[in-house]
Image (cartoon, rainbow, N blue to C red):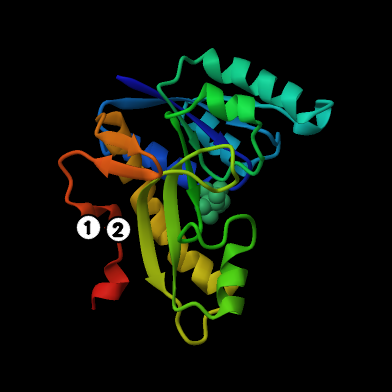
Amino acid sequence: MKRIVILISGRGSNMENLMRAERQGELGDARIVAVLSNRPDAKGLRSAADAGIHTLAFDHKQYPDRTSFDAALMTAIDAHQPDLVVLAGFMRILSEGFVRHYEGRLLNIHPSLLPAFPGLHTHQRALAEGVRLHGCSVHFVTSTLDHGPIILQAAVPVLDGDDEARLAARVLVEEHTIYPRAVRWFVEGRLTIQGLCVRVRGEPRENALHAPDLLR
Ligand code: GRF
């Protein structure tokens, strides 16, 4: 059984969706053992606690620098002996030491088709740039922000009349589809990293792209 620790900073819809997926057996042989946040007021902490999952909040403002915050966070994570650490809307830049410590077992979801639009306000930027295609990516984390071997992406069209909220909602539906799938592939031990590319054993390459709205 693989042990999963999830890190959040806010709403926690991806975390809630992963909890649902775990309950329904969609993550394979895995258990979410803890949910940690850098914000004590993160909404998702409540739903995790209500589901009986161990929760813990660290207020990053209480730490003098990034290194000491990350060290405290690592100690708390490691107490749960995770096989996988999942960033689900965790809005902190992580130090190199942190990323190295969890290398190969640290996943993130980002609301764009990476490498386009790393960083914040991805939907707004996609609209401003006039792209026709947008989406989300699940990737292994490296010490470069929103960068690393991509496991799975979902693409959605940008439609006439879209505003940030509509586009974000369309992307979020796909986030909730691809994150459990990528976690399951990890749990099943099917992912191999080759440079910046990820191979998924036993899965046709096209299954690493989810694009239902584009196939009409
Ligand atoms: C998601 O859009 C995720 O891709 C990004 O932050 C947002 C978190 O949303 N990293 P939620 O907290 O999972 O609802």
Residue at the image point whose x is 50% and y is 71% from the top: 167
- Ligand 1 closer than 8 Å to the CB at disc 1? no
Question: Which type of secondary structure does the marked residue at label 1 adopt?
Answer: helix
Question: Which type of secondary structure does the marked residue at label 2 adopt?
Answer: strand
Horizontal relation, residue 116 to residue 175: left or right: right
Tag 1 and tag 2, C-beta contact below 8 Å: yes
- Ligand 1 closer than 8 Å to the CB at disc 2? no
At label 1, counting other C-alpha atoms closer than 10 Å, the crowd grade (few under 14, some 14-19, many 20 or more) is few
Three-letter code, disc 2: Leu
Q: Could you give the CA–CA distance between mark 1 and mark 2, rounded to whole angstroms?
A: 6 Å
Displayed quadrant of residue 215: bottom left
Displayed quadrant of residue 183: top left
Q: Residue furthest front?
A: 195
Mark on residue 129?
A: none
Circle 1 is placed at which residue position?
Answer: 206
174 or 204: nearer the viewer = 204
Res 59 seen here: yes
Horizontal relation, residue 192 to residue 80: left or right: left
Three-letter code, disc 1: Glu
Where residue 206 appears, x then y in whole percent?
Answer: 22, 57
Residue at the image point whose x is 45% and y is 77% from the top: 158
Q: Quadrant for the C terminus, please.
A: bottom left
Residue at the image point whose x is 60% and y is 41% from the top: 90
Circle 2 is placed at which residue position?
Answer: 209
Give the answer, above or below, for where 11 lies relative to 45: below
At label 2, counting other C-alpha atoms closer than 10 Å, the crowd grade (few under 14, some 14-19, many 20 or more) is some
Give the answer, above or below, for where 77 lies relative to 8: above
Where residue 112 appears, x then y in whole percent?
Answer: 49, 60
